[in-house]
């Protein structure tokens, strides 16, 4: 069964996570600190959009206010968690022993595997915009790992660049899943062909392109789900 | 005996191994774990778990 859908900006799940009240132990920051999360996909009580697409269970477009806002140290098992920084600076701390700072176009893949904790913070003075993607692993309890890379906006201009997946130059995750990025000057036609058995989800971060003959303005998504999962 | 992954925080449960350190004996079926049991990692109650079956790292490696 193939399901086509368009998720408009305002139709995504929405979470407003202030650093006070119920979230105080989870969300770091001064009392005015807040994380906002627009979820194209999410899970159980957090779900208000479409419940995942294949092995991708979370796609969150998040904004952290500056000066210390973020997620305090918290545990995961198994999930492969990726962060793609759109603007600002992300400080990532994990129990594999990595303390990292990622800026615009940087991204990481953190595979929690047999168990790992992480903290995600905006300690800078600018707002942080970051996209989080969670993918089911192919296997339980693999050794935890962390890798980072960078999308080069010059080398990657006007071509579809694979960031995560089984392609040269991309970060491999041992799963039938890819993340690619396109930064286009416009006025061009770009073709992406997913494997026949796979679905796809195209998210428009900025601009006003026509994605797959569907008009998709900024921060909208367009997808095809080749269930069942 | 089955192995499960919860979509909440990624916590896994192996019925054959149980979770003796959390008071659940080896061989306990997921269905027989009390309803008031909560995830040791993220605190989600059993009713909030979304379980999918998935193999272990070692088992999934090619022979």
Image: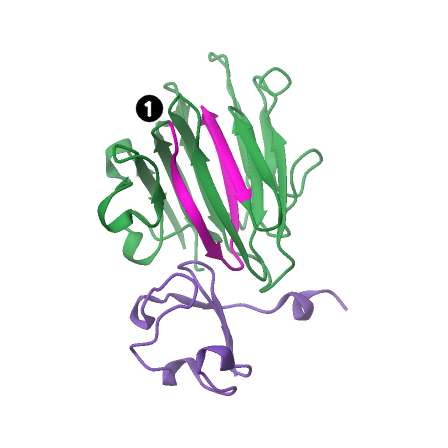
Chain colours: A green, B purple
Q: What residue lies at 33% left-to-right and 50% top-to-bottom? A: A25
Q: How many marks?
A: 1
Q: Position of residue A192 (x, y in %)?
A: 54, 32
Residue A73: x percent and y percent? 45, 49
Above or below B47: residue A126: above
* Residue A122 x/y as whole percent: 43, 31
Instruction: Give the residue displayed 67% in from the left and 71% down from the top.
Output: B59
| Dominant secondary structure of the residues highlighted in magenta in the image | strand
Asked if residue A200 can be seen in this view, the reply is: no
Of residues A192 and A45, the one nearer the viewer is: A45
The answer to whether residue A198 is left or right of residue A130 is right
Q: Which of the image's four quarters has the N terminus of chain A? A: bottom left
| Closer-to-camera residue (A22/A197) | A22
For the residue pair A199 and A101, the one nearer the viewer reads as: A101
Above/below status of A179 relative to A135: above
> Residue most toward the right?
B63
Image x and y of residue A215, in percent: 34, 25
Q: Residue at x 28, y 57 (%)?
A: A45
Q: Give the range drawn in magenta.
A: A67-93
Report crowding for label 1: few under 14, some 14 to 19, many 20 or more residues within 10 A (C-alpha). some
Where, quadrant-wise, is the C terminus of chain A in this rendering? bottom left
Q: Is mark 1 on a helix, strand or loop?
A: loop
Residue for point 33% across, 24% down: A217
Is residue A179 at least partly visible in the picture?
A: yes
Q: Name the residue under label 1.
A: A217
For residue A141, which quarter of the picture? bottom right
Parent chain of label 1: A
Residue A212 covered by magenta stretch? no
């Amino acid at each position: 069964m193939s399901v086509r859908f368009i998720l408009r900006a305002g139709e995504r799940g929405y979470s407003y996570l202030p650093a006070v009240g119920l979230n105080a132990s989870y969300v770091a920051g001064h009392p005015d600190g807040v994380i906002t999360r627009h979820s194209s996909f999410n899970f159980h009580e957090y779900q208000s959009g479409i419940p995942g697409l294949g092995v991708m269970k979370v796609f969150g477009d998040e904004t952290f206010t500056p000066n210390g806002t973020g997620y305090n140290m918290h545990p995961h098992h198994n999930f492969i968690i990726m962060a793609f920084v759109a603007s600002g600076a992300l400080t990532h701390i994990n129990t594999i022993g990595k303390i990292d700072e990622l800026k615009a176009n940087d991204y990481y893949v953190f595979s929690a595997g047999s168990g790992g904790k992480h903290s995600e913070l905006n300690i800078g003075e600018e707002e942080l915009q970051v996209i989080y993607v969670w993918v089911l692993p192919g296997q339980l309890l693999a050794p935890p790992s962390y890798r980072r890379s960078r999308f080069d906006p010059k080398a990657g201009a006007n071509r579809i660049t694979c960031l995560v997946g089984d392609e040269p130059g991309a970060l491999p995750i041992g799963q039938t899943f890819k993340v690619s990025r396109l930064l286009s000057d416009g006025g061009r036609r770009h073709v992406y062909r997913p494997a026949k058995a796979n679905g796809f989800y195209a998210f428009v971060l900025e601009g006003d392109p026509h994605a797959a003959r569907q008009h998709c303005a900024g921060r909208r998504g367009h997808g095809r789900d080749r269930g069942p999962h | 005996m089955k192995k499960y992954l919860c979509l909440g925080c990624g916590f896994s449960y192996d019925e054959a191994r149980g979770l003796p350190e959390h008071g659940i004996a080896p061989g306990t079926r997921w269905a027989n774990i009390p309803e008031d049991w909560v995830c040791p990692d993220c605190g989600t109650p059993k009713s909030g778990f979304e379980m999918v079956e998935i193999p272990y790292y070692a088992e999934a490696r090619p022979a």
